[in-house]
Amino acid sequence: MLTNLTLAVLDPERSRRFYMTAFGLPETGQSAPGMALLELGHGVTLLLQDVQASSAAPTPGGVELGFEVEDVEGTRHALLALGAEVGEMQAMGWGGGFDARDPDGHALSIFRKRE
């Protein structure tokens, strides 16, 4: 069972603020210098670890995180306000969304499925 996802980041505090602000992810209370631990739900945590201390990857990038959100347009505006690289909205038969990148260049897929 997957319980933890680690992202190698350049600035864990900046990444912590980004993910808390953009997606409302709460801290687990177990963060330490050089890392931040956020709750993704369903018993899974997101570890944001300084790239120098991480065995996840030698450089940031190389992973895509998919976030299903209630308000795609609102999330897009929030990411733009945070200075994220944000793509155009795309409508699909199953719903719609957009692609973006976090401050370290990790790919983000933001979407909402049709009901």
Image (cartoon, helix red, strand yellow):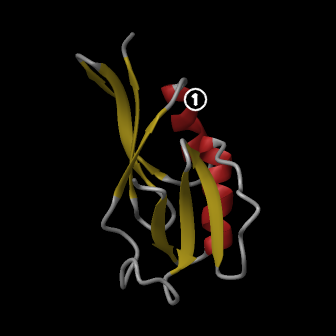
Residue at screen point 68% across, 59% down: 17
Q: Mark 1 points at which residue?
A: 74
Q: Is residue 40 shown above or below 94?
A: below
Residue 88 visible from this viewpoint: no
Q: Where is residue 45 in the image (x, y as percent from the top left)?
A: 56, 56
Residue at screen point 55% across, 76% down: 49
Q: Is residue 66 shown above or below 3?
A: above
Q: Which of 83 and 37 is in front in this view?
A: 37
Q: In the displayed orientation, state which residue is furthest to the left.
A: 93
Among the 4 quarters of the image, the one containing residue 11: bottom right
Disc 1 marks a residue whose amino acid type is Gly
Query: In the drawing, does residue 93 fall left or right of residue 99?
Result: left
Residue at screen point 55% across, 66% down: 47
Query: In the drawing, does residue 30 fall left or right of residue 62?
Result: right
Q: Is residue 32 shown above or below 102?
A: below
Q: Where is residue 30 in the image (x, y as percent from the top left)?
A: 72, 67
